[in-house]
Image: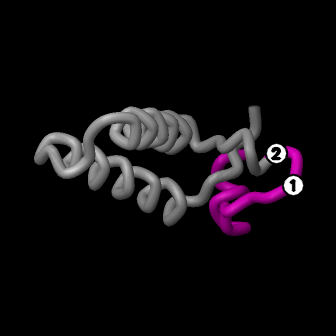
Amino acid sequence: MKTNMGTVDRIFRLLVAVVIAILYAANQITGTAAIILLILAGIFILTSVISFCPLYLPFGLSTKKKSEQKQSS
């Protein structure tokens, strides 16, 4: 599996996941919306850790810079 996420993309996804977790812990989001957002946060964390987004694959997208691609090869 070839990585297709750049550093900025990974950091952004992690920050969004943290914000969702904070909102949930502060009871700002509840019910079905909370469940959906927590699942999304989990997906964001997983894709950030493995540096691979399966949704980018069919479209041939990559947020990695050329310099990042050379380092991981």
Specify whether 23 is left or right of 69. left
Q: Residue at x 73, y 67 (%)?
A: 66
Q: Quadrant of the N terminus?
A: top right
Q: Residue at x 46, y 54 (%)?
A: 13
Question: Is 61 included in the stretch rendered in magenta?
Answer: yes
Report the magenta residues as a range: 57-73
Rendered location of residue 57, percent (x, y):
82, 45
Q: Report the residue marked by disc 2.
A: 57
**Residue 70, image quadrant:** bottom right
| Secondary-structure class at tag 1 | loop
The structure's colour scheme is: one colour
**Residue 60, image quadrant:** bottom right
Rendered location of residue 14, percent (x, y):
39, 51
User: What's the residue type where badge 1 is placed?
Assistant: Gly
Q: Nearer the viewer, residue 37 or 46?
A: 37
Question: Is 63 included in the stretch rendered in magenta?
Answer: yes
Q: Nearer the viewer, residue 65 or 59?
A: 59
Q: Report the residue marked by disc 1.
A: 60
Crowding around mark 2 (Cα neighbors within 10 Å: few <14, some 14 to 19, many 20+) is few
Q: Residue at x 56, y 36 (%)?
A: 50
In this picture, is 8 found above or below 43?
Answer: below
- Are the two marked residues, 2 and 1, in contact with CB atoms closer than 8 angstroms? yes
> Would you say residue 47 is visible in this rendering?
yes
Q: Quadrant of the C terminus?
A: top right
Q: Residue at x 67, y 68 (%)?
A: 65
Rendered location of residue 44, percent (x, y):
49, 43
